[in-house]
Amino acid sequence: METEAVLALGWQHTPKGFVKRFDFLDFKEALSFINRVGDFSEAHQHHPEIINNYNLVRLRLWTHDTDSLTEKDVHWVLAFEKQDQH
């Protein structure tokens, strides 16, 4: 698995998946980001946990079917980071 590439993009490797926090200027900007995450996730048929607190968004990737990190999670992170310029 390409965990090093994910970590190099600022994601943390936790016991329950890859996690990254995104900070925005305000709620509207955070919500726009969440909508982009949703569209991207639908297109890739893999969905992160999304936690929002005003201008902060936290994403967590974990393959629920296997209850573990998988290549699906790595591929989601790498593809998302490549296309999204926060």
Image (cartoon, rainbow, N blue to C red):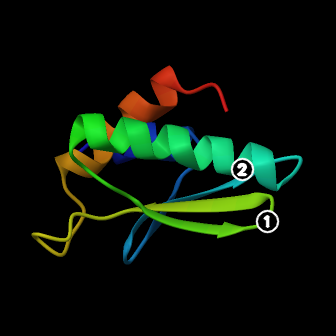
Which of 67/13 is in front?
67
- What quarter of the picture does the N terminus occupy? top left
Residue at image location 87% in from the left, 51% down from the top: 26
C-beta proximity under 8 Å, tags 2 and 1: yes
Q: Does residue 2 appear in the picture of this structure? A: no
- What quarter of the picture does the C terminus occupy? top right
Residue at image location 74% in from the left, 61% down from the top: 56
**Residue 11 vertical position relative to residue 58 in the rendered view, above or below:** above
Residue at image location 44% in from the left, 33% down from the top: 80
Which residue, given by chain and number where applicable, does mark 1 sit on?
Answer: 54
| Dot 2 or dot 1, earlier in sequence | 2
Residue 75 location, x and y as percent? 28, 37
SS for callout 2 = helix
In the image, is 27 to the left or to the right of 78? right
Which of 71/51 is in front?
51
Using the numbered discs, state the Cα–Cα distance from disc 2 to disc 1 in whole angstroms. 7 Å
Q: Does residue 76 appear in the picture of this structure? A: yes
In the image, is 26 to the left or to the right of 65? right
Residue 57 location, x and y as percent? 66, 59
Task: Please name the amino acid that badge 2 sits on.
Answer: Ala
Which residue, given by chain and number where applicable, does mark 2 sit on?
Answer: 30
Residue 5 location, x and y as percent? 42, 36
**Residue 82 vertical position relative to residue 50 in the rendered view, above or below:** above
As drawn, the label of residue 5 is none
Residue at image location 28% in from the left, 50% down from the top: 73
